[in-house]
Amino acid sequence: MDSETETTQASSTELYAPDYKKGSSSSSITSLVWTSLLSWLTFLLFPLFFLLNHALLRLPSIYSSASSFNFKPLPVVELTTTDQQQDLLPPPTAQLSGNKDDDKQDVYEEQKIKKLTVVLDLDETLVCAYETSSLPDIIRNRAIESGLKWFDLECLSSDKESDGTPKVNHVTVFERPGLQEFLEKVSEFADLVLFTAGLESYARPLVDRIDVDNRFVSRLYRPSTTSTEYREHVKDLSCVSKDLNRTVIVDNNPFSFVLQPLNGIPCIPFSAGQPYDVQLLEVLLPLLKRLSLQENVRPVLYNRFRMPEWFQQHGILTLNWSL
């Protein structure tokens, strides 16, 4: 735009420059008047030219950023609205319609798909737990006042007392909002598996409290995890199901599913300071329902989260992942 201004000024000078060769005083006066007028116009219009130039210079960067590949940083689930989820996920393989024949066909197609297996992490995914003696009263009181469900738990520690007996730990546990309804609804269309890196002496009594209806078909604890060159306590889904096309894992720690990143759903870590968290019912439940209708969940999850690229950005480059 600066070059256009210079061109305008140059053109104006050529058009209105006084013709000294003719020696006409009236012509000189007229030319001086026009020159002065153009100078004032240039002075007045310069701010407008500057603003237009600045705006045009910004346009290429805006369009280039929109067209380039932008990795969705973790966590991304909580930022996705229902409409965005519909755009990111392919249409379900079975959709109900108003036609009864279509309904029967949809149910038939749905029944042909093997039941989905949903693997759930425990700490910071379904609950958050704190050593009771170290939990500040203000955090406990605010969480309770806001309506979070909670309970105190006694669990055996791997440490020993002076007399050799196992040490007893006192833990305060807060349930993630909507936990019971989430487990109930997901169990209607999927097999639920609990997979935690926590010790069984701690996790078993905790899960007994949150799963009184025995909705988990299986429970796996720290000994079931594996170590890799990148991380310890990795959850290998091959020990859960032979059909990875119909298996997903929900975990707040993406490195837990580094061996099968195409099956992972990263979620926001839950803490007692998030009493109005809506991850379970408003984000994860709709997503899992859609996945339950997919013959192969991995292409859907890859398009949604791009986890292999995320791991590559974090220095994990050598694993062989395929859809």
Image (cartoon, rainbow, N blue to C red):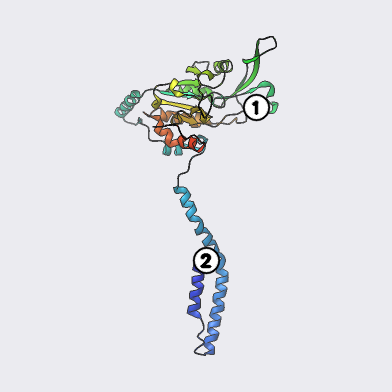
Foreground residue, 130 or 235? 235
Q: Which residue appears at 62% of the width and 30% of the height?
A: 273
Amino acid under disc 2: Asp
Foreground residue, 100 or 302? 302
Q: Do the residues labelled 1 and 2 touch (CB within 8 Å)?
A: no
Instruction: Name the residue carrying label 1.
Output: 145
Q: Where is residue 283 in the image (x, y as percent from the top left)?
A: 49, 32
Is residue 263 shown to the viewer in this render?
yes
Identify the secondary structure beneath mark 2. Answer: helix
Q: Which residue appears at 53% of the width and 29% of the height?
A: 253
Q: Where is residue 264 in the image (x, y as percent from the top left)?
A: 47, 30
- Crowd around label 2: few <14 · some 14–19 · many ≥20 (10 Å): few
Q: Where is residue 55 in the image (x, y as percent from the top left)?
A: 52, 58
Is residue 221 shown to the viewer in this render?
no
Q: Which residue appears at 55% of the width and 68% of the height?
A: 45
Q: Residue 2 carries which label?
A: 2
